[in-house]
Image (cartoon, helix red, strand yellow):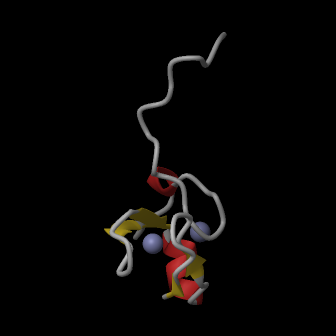
């Protein structure tokens, strides 16, 4: 088994914990308020109020 062709889900990993958001309920993707790059957040981090940091501009927030 090889996994060399599974790059279609770029951007679907939680920005806070790195989990694949497809596997977590209530996950969201949205654009950074500061630089409009895509951010993903899983349902667990949302319910816990975990901070995220934009990987592009460093914006912190919920
Ligand atoms: Zn998360
Ligand atoms: Zn940003």
User: In which quarter of the view is residue 50 placed?
Assistant: bottom right
Q: Is residue 23 above or below residue 33?
A: above
Rendering coords of residue 33 (x, y %) = 35, 81
Q: Nearer the viewer, residue 31 or 27?
A: 31
Write the residue at 55% across / 52% down.
Answer: 20
Left or right, residue 58 beside residue 11: right
Write the residue at 44% across / 40% down.
Answer: 9
Rendering coords of residue 12 (x, y %) = 46, 51
Question: Ligand 2 sits in which quadrant?
Answer: bottom left
Left or right, residue 35 beside residue 58: left
Rendering coords of residue 62 (x, y %) = 48, 88
Q: Is residue 28 above or below residue 60?
A: above
User: In which quarter of the view is residue 40 placed?
Assistant: bottom left
Q: Nearer the viewer, residue 48 or 51?
A: 51
Write the residue at 42% across / 67% down.
Answer: 27
Q: Is residue 57 above or below residue 19?
A: below
Q: Nearer the viewer, residue 26 or 28?
A: 28
């Amino acid at each position: 088994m090889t996994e060399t062709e599974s790059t279609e889900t770029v951007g679907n990993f939680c920005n806070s914990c790195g989990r694949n958001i497809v596997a977590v309920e209530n996950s969201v993707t949205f654009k950074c308020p500061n630089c409009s790059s895509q951010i993903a957040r899983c349902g667990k981090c949302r319910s816990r109020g975990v901070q995220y940091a934009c990987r592009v501009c460093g914006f912190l927030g919920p």
